Image (cartoon, helix red, strand yellow):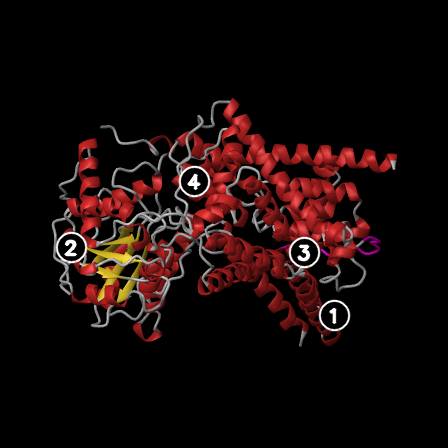
Amino acid sequence: MEVLSSAHPIPLVALVGNPNCGKTALFNVLTGSRQKVANYAGVTVERKEGSLLTPSGSRVRILDLPGAYSLDPLTPDEQVTADVLLGRRAGESAPDFVVCVTDATNLRQNLRLVLSLKRLGLPMVVALNMTDIARRKGIVIDAERLARELGVPVVETVGVKASGAKRLIEMLDSAAIPARAAGRFDWRTPTSADIARDQAEVRRILTAVGADRIDGVTFSDKLDAVVLHPVAGPLILAAILFLVFQAVFAWAQVPMDAIKAGVDAVAGWLGHAMPESLLKGLLVNGVLAGVGSVFVFLPQIIILFFFILMLEESGYLPRAAFLLDRLMGSVGLSGRAFIPLLSSFACAIPGVMATRTIQNPRDRLATIMIAPLMTCSARLPVYALIIGAFIPQRTLWGGLQLQGMVLFVLYLVGVASAMAVAYVLKRAGAGARLQTLMLELPVYHWPNVRNLAIGLWQRVEIFLSRVGTIILALMVILWALSSFPAPPPGATGPAIQYSIAGHLGSWLAVIFKPIGFNWQISIALVPGLAAREVAVGALGTVYALSAASGNVSGALTPLISHSWSLPTALSLLAWYVFAPQCLSTLATVKRETNSWRYPIIMASYLFALAYLGSFITFRVATALSNLG
Amino acid sequence: MSHVLDNLLVVAALLASAVYALFKLGPRALRRAALSRVAGWAVRTPGWFGLRSLAARLDAAARQPSGSCGGCDNCGSEGGAAQGSPPTNLPASDSASLSAALSGNGSEIKIPLASIGRRQQR
């Protein structure tokens, strides 16, 4: 491989293609990365870079770009792709070589981008991806003939197999990537005549390579007849989501009990093995009580993501977007907002980033503003703790668990609040006008076990990483703030009441008293600003230091069920439905909107909603319990 | 274990936690400045300390954006979220050039809200 000029001695190869054609899967195979892949368009909204060491020892930089249907961008993610390819990105030269990834099962659509890229004049190879699926569907494409017709090399690839990019790597290894003057492109925005010419050329090529067959009714079509049915479709969607939340509680109980027992055993052993000292206090009341309280929710996180990943991989999620388009349109959101909002169920940060696929700026802004109202996975430990403490483990009709139903309702409240806010934004003129949803529905397929396992492992890594780093650090700090200064001689209350955190909690309790929060909850909300689940750890530490016996790591649930009233618990749930207790989300909103204005507006309205929601919940629940 | 050692360990844990929390939750500019400063100190140490590779990694980390939540470090990180830092097994010249190329990318994307999503004027 020819090495380029001294400014960029390592060639840059860009993966370009239509959305959902398998670019990121191919990128992962080429670079050994584990970037997120899913069976719907718009997963990649940002450039990702990795490196490949070819068999001959050459180093190549590989760039994974967001999917694009053309080089005439309609959305911010397509803009990223066009800017990189056209050399318009500040401080970044255009790629030296392009791998145009095409979906072999949908060549008719993919070839138009190939023709556009060819006109761009960059050295290029076409990767005919998903050839395994195409063969199973009886689509056999003559790659050599396709190469002759296009005038560029064509290689077959299978992005989901480790060996699927072998021929592409060989080609990158053997191809002489020519040095090229950067930034000189013969590119102009295509006219309608150009587009018509491209379509005619695509039809000619498809006929020549024997890929002009148009499939009749496929298995996906038959399934869609049921799944997208106006009546059956929404019912199926509701049933799927309902079952997911049932499983989160029903399946997680045994592993959660095992983790709790493990944490208790370690705390008990430390309590007996170590003499009374500051170090023992830190380990038992700070680390184990705090971190252990969060760690026990790992099984629920795994189960939730297992289902989310299954739905992503199968291709069902875009169907859900289609089903909800009418509802979203009625509150001023486009159907395209569904995927960002769905991503926000995992975490609001990728959800906010995924709004780049939304074409209309006002619609994008409205989606960003409501993304934090979707129930992210960090809320799950908080919800699960309170539900576990206050909602009995009762089975209702048909074996349905009451706790799972309450969790389902909390998720629904989050969605309903988001829709309500979107409606208000629409009325205020910030939402979008009703737009037609044009969405590519991928073919259904069984989830790839490797992708599923990698996705789950990544979620476990993220959760454990948070528990072992920032949550641990904050718990140590909170333990110190809750332990010093020591109580004065003759003090009668728990030591924590005389500490810095105790004083802070009593000041904050004045603000939070009208919504039913005690000083322990008020303290927990402060470190909980970093991330929502930190509040659970903080409650563990605060109650450990408030309790007579040291070990409460596994006993936080019964402790809060005795010391809080039901209205207080419901009020805290309402708080967590709305409160923007996540600095990272606000920072991401600032970055995505390029302004402090929107994160400030977002934090203000969400805190106001949280306080109002908690106040109403607490007062109504108190009044009802007094009546009872 | 003596009380003195116990207390020393507690103080060390507390200091480490405070620095880490400030590092992760504080302003990104502070994080970058701190990493660059430490990388600068490391690179000025005599060669036999063997801190040069550490300096290179710290320098790369200073340029790499990351999430403040301690999670996936994938919130808006376009500057090489996949494998943004230069591979450490590269020859020094290649590593330096790759590092230079990556640093030229700009650490984050800025798309002003008002200027996105509009079809180019024809």
Q: Nearer the viewer, residue A493 or A102?
A: A102
Instruction: Note whether B50 is above or below B74 in the view shown.
Output: below
**Front of the two marks 3 and 2:** 2
Q: Mark 4 highlights which residue?
A: A355
- Density class for disc 3 (Cα within 10 Å; few <14, some 14-19, many ≥20) is many
Q: Mark 1 highlights which residue?
A: A276
Image quarter in which the C terminus of chain A is found = top right
**Front of the two marks 1 and 3:** 3
Residue plotted at (31% across, 71% down): B46
Residue A478 in which image quadrant: bottom right
Q: Is residue A611 visible?
A: yes
Residue plotted at (56% across, 49% down): A530
x, y percent for residue A403: 72, 51
Q: Disc 4 to disc 1, how far (Cα)?
A: 53 Å
Question: In the rendering, which numbered label is found on residue A152?
Answer: 2
**Front of the two marks 2 and 1:** 2
Q: Amino acid at mark 2?
A: Val
Query: Which chain does the residue under circle 3 lie in?
Result: A
Q: Secondary structure at mark 1?
A: loop
Q: Nearer the viewer, residue A559 or A97?
A: A97
**Front of the two marks 2 and 4:** 2
Q: Amino acid at mark 3?
A: Phe
What span is in magenta?
A478-493
Q: Amino acid at mark 4?
A: Thr
